[in-house]
Image (cartoon, rainbow, N blue to C red):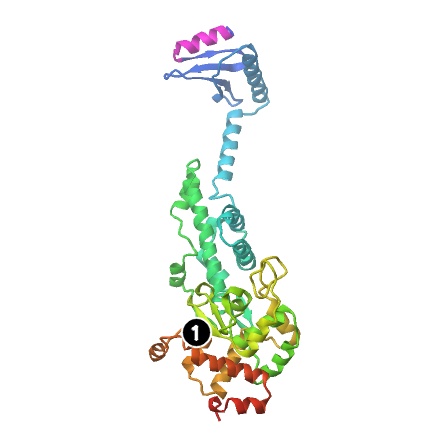
Amino acid sequence: MPLTTRTIRTLVKSQRPGMWAGRNGLNLIISISGSATWALRYSTQDGKRRLMKLADYEPIDEAALAGLEADAAEHRKAIKAGNDPLAEREAADRAADVETTNPTGDTFKEAALTYIAENKAGWKNPKHCQQWENTLTTYAYPIIGDKLAHEVTMDDVKRVLQQPYERNGTKATLWTGARETATRVRSRVEIVINATKAKAIADNSNAQRQALWRNHHNPADCASLRYAGLNGKQTKSNFKAMDWKAVPAFMADIMAKVDYSAKALALTILCATRSNETLNATWCEFDLDNATWTIPADRMKMGKEHRVPLSTTALTILKNTLRVEGNPFVFPGAKRERPLSNMAMLEMLRGMRKDEGLTVHGFRSAFRDWITETTLHPDAIAEQALAHAIDNKVERAYRRGDAFERRKDLMQQWSDYLTMDHAQYGKSWTKFIAL
């Protein structure tokens, strides 16, 4: 006898365990616990008896019952045609499990892009996002980008770090030729894989995914890579420097220019500072009355405040530099309240000395060579002028102060060497010139 809505409600309310047949093989099943489900009972063409769940029980009416009977009728048509709907459903479920039980379902590149997208809002410096993307795009993605994150091996990471790298004509690997860049790449690969693993372990909806990652060791772990043979001393590639004898002629050329890039480069040469120290200089750091430039510790490579004695030429440059209202930087860039770009001085230098491969940092080397080869100033004073770290214990004891008064003479002599004619310079600085 077909099931009616009234009969169904009575059976479900009674919670009496059993199975009751309706039209088209549709069955109402009530379990021992009292829960009710709808199922299709059928036999395949090869005689196998099947019971396939169709739906959990919900309050029934005539329309809902008619819909269930119609579904059962559709399945019976498929069975008559030789199909087995339960076997097909199980196969589809297995395929879905395979698809969703990849550790992340993502390649390393996809996982990295996801990590960047999820974390960039919390990075203090907006440049960090671009730095992440640039380093991974340049060095990691070509080698491991298409591999699933859990399949990246230690050998893969070593290939990333040991890929060919060339700088200033010196051939090396990324690890030996650009250690700082390589270290950042390794760290970012490690972070992406750790983050991907953490998400997989936390996903309790997929036990197979958790199992794949639970005993996974990060192949970019620094200590493990060293044990696995990632070694090699860093290849030193010195910044190409202009010969100190040629700097005065170059200085005359640069002093003839009036743009901010030229003024910044001239001040960098005169003060023997690093590029970023000059480019990010603000007017509040300068005491022009006392000819002193105080660079705060957070802008110095060694993390220690550095006072620079300003020569007469350096003072002239600063006094003749136009201040831009609302921009605190001495050398303002095109964007409001921003300094010149990191490339401004280098582009100026290369525009004036094409095909020589010179670097702005190389002027610090020229300054140091000039001191060593032509002056009587102690090495300790030279190193303090360059704000270098102190290695020698004797020098450390000698340099407990910052030797500011001694460095005044050194920086003025350097300025005069760059801007005076030879005879006048020799007459002015006889006591400090090495004969």
Res. 359 visible in picture? no
Q: Residue furthest bottom?
A: 435
**Considering the numbered disc 1 on the image, is that residue within a helix, a strand or a loop?**
loop
**Location of residue 201 by image quarter:** top left
15 is within the stretch colored magenta? yes
Left or right: 307 in relation to 395? right
**Location of residue 316 by image quarter:** bottom right
Res. 367 visible in picture? yes
Q: How many marks?
A: 1
Residues 415 and 361: in front is 415
Magenta part of the chain: 5-17
Would you place residue 357 above or below residue 191 in this image?
below
Looking at the image, which residue is at 47% across and 53% down?
152
Residue 348 locus on image (x, y percent): 63, 71
Residues 312 and 432: in front is 312
Tell me the amino acid under the disc marked 1.
His
Looking at the image, which residue is at 60% across and 60% down?
325
Determine the main secondary structure of the stretch shown in magenta: helix
Left or right: 314 in relation to 299? right
**Crowding near the residue tagged with mark 1, few <14, some 14–19, many ≥20 C-alpha atoms within 10 Å:** few
Q: Write down the residue under mark 1.
A: 388
Residues 155 and 134: in front is 134
Residue 281 locus on image (x, y percent): 53, 66
Would you place residue 17 above or below residue 385 in this image?
above
Residue 29 locus on image (x, y percent): 44, 15
